[in-house]
Image (cartoon, rainbow, N blue to C red):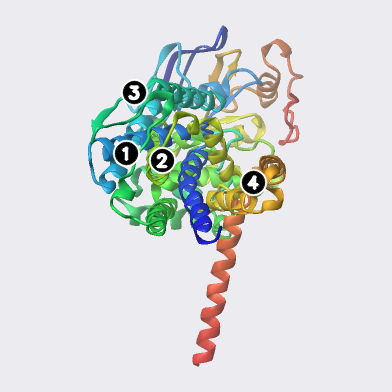
Amino acid sequence: MLEVSDVAVSYGNIEALRGVELSVEEGGITCLLGPNGAGKTTLMMTIAGILRPRRGRIRFLDRDITGMRPSGVVKRGIALVPENRLVFPAMNVHENLIAGAYLRLGKRKAQVQRDVDHVFERFPRLQERSKQLAGTLSGGEQQMLAVARALMARPRLLMMDEPSLGLAPLIVEEIFRIISDLNADGTTIFLVEQNAHMALQVADHFFLLEQGQVSFSGKPGQLSEHEVIQRAYLGKSAQHDPPAGDRGRPDGTTHPSG
Amino acid sequence: MGGDYLIAVLSNIGMISFIALSAYLLLVVGEISFGQQAFFAVSAYGSGIATAMWGWPIWLGLLWGALVAGVAALVVAIPTVRLRGLYFSVATLAFAEMVRLILEIFTYQVEIDGELVGPNGSDGFRDIRAIYDSNVSAFEYLLIIYGLLAVVLVGFLILERSRLGAIFRMIGEDPMLTEMQGLNVTAHKILAVVLAGVVAGIGGALYAHLTTYVEPKIFNVMLGVHGLAYGLIGGLGTAFGPLIGVAIDIGLLESIRAISGYRMIVFGGLVAVLLIVRPRGLLDEAAVHWLRVRWRELRRGLRRGWRRAEG
């Protein structure tokens, strides 16, 4: 569905991505894991059209979307839930939802309204707070609102950049339950996560990104969770052989420092 | 004193309101312009030339002035809207100073009834007498100013409830997130700059015809800074915000004689305090939201009371 081939992105002289190769299969949940600074967010932003690659190709549904404007990428059916900048804080919840559907609001008002109702069924808490300013929602509610708004664009592919960042464990579980539900209803999901434990539970396929390159591609279980966590949090340089048979179960909410 | 003075103050409030609304529209899309006085100036000259030199009727002169201001805004917008934050502010300031300096040397005069009429560089542009020649009284002109202000204000209120107005607010809050919703931020910003230019232009055309005389130095940066400050004082949550700002400055500060000599000091202090206490003005988005909620509750309460009274 999505094919990224040999994509390189630089910030000035610093190479953030150095020839990334990966693909996302239709209908599944694909995860991208890796340590801080590996280039995960850079890759998401590049696919979404916010950053331009120095070289390489990005294809979506067999069409080249390399270097396309963000609005063009959204129209092709890719929605990104960005990290940290989730909602329009001075607009209320309902207005935030409508914002996700502006492209078709002019012609299909009734359809948009049905989608709002549908999203409210999925997120009853948002309906309760429909007239509340988005900036006054809790972190978890803002994350839900960001996901809900992305759904309003009726994406074929939903990309999420660290949806669990800074949220309490119970909320993280709720977010991942929502991710699984969305996928079960037919939305393809491409997820960047630091929370390897949760990510490996939902993923059909995952990639490890280290120092701007994909260093592993496979199904959960092909690498021990212990090794994934070591490589995802610390990078290859810190890797050493895990004790045999030890499938470490660290607290799922642990975040790396820095 | 008396009626004439009151009419003069009210006329001033009305005309300055246009430049305040103009700067406000750009603040809504997240841009700070120090150059809205340029569109005010361009339209003052443009409409003056149309009525005093080409003999056009007043209404057509006003329309022409607003149109010229809009075109000037488009010319400014295309290269500048991609600039972010401070760079946009500096670019608008540079443009406005450029316009002022060009007007200092701009000479275009024709002889009408044995007298030279038209802009004459730094000596300014005299005898824009259209409203006196057609016997419009000061009070009637006041009604024209407020009639046009009402039209523009209603336009703003409709805009705020529209899809376009919501997109403007989204861009002001987070342009990148807006782009991610599939919207063309650059095109919408250009539209906002052009609309703001037209609004400032209406004020400029009205101004030229009320004073009958304009000169380049009137349109210095302080005019633009005031226009900007009104929105920041009154609030960015609704178009009434900048109007409240104008009323506070001209209506209160300039009219109270006891502080007349200290007006700029009081005004500057007020802006500084408000920027700390309420960075988005008295009627900011949260205040407007609060008022809407209360208003809904009040209406619901009244309706319930009405039904009870009936039943």
Which residue is situated farthest in the bottom direction here? B311
User: Secondary structure beneath disc 2?
Assistant: helix
Between the C-alphas of marks 1 and 2, the distance is 9 Å
Query: Which image quarter: residue A212?
Result: top right
Label 4, on which residue?
A140
Residues at marks 1 and 2 touching, judged by CB atoms closer than 8 Å: yes
Which residue is situated farthest in the front direction here? B114
Q: Position of residue A256 (x, y in %)?
A: 73, 26
Residues at marks 2 and 3 touching, judged by CB atoms closer than 8 Å: no
Disc 1 or 3, which lies upstream in sequence? Answer: 1
Q: Amino acid at mark 2?
A: Gly
Horizontal arrangement in the rendering, residue B182 relative to residue B4 (left or right): left
Between the C-alphas of marks 1 and 3, the distance is 16 Å
User: Secondary structure beneath disc 1?
Assistant: helix
Q: What is the chain identity of the residue bearing mark 1?
A: B
For disc 1, the neighbor class at 10 Å (few under 14, some 14 to 19, many from 20) is: many
Instruction: Name the residue located 49 percent from the left edge and 42 percent from the top edge.
Output: B170
Q: Amino acid at mark 1?
A: Ser
Q: What is the chain identity of the residue bearing mark 3?
A: B
Who is closer to the viewer here, A235 or B204?
B204
Does residue A158 appear in the picture of this structure? no
Horizontal arrangement in the rendering, residue B169 relative to residue B198 (left or right): right
Instruction: Name the residue located 49 percent from the left edge and 91 percent from the top edge.
Output: B310
Between the C-alphas of marks 2 and 3, the distance is 19 Å
Q: Position of residue B117 (x, y in %)?
A: 30, 32
Label 2, on which residue?
B204
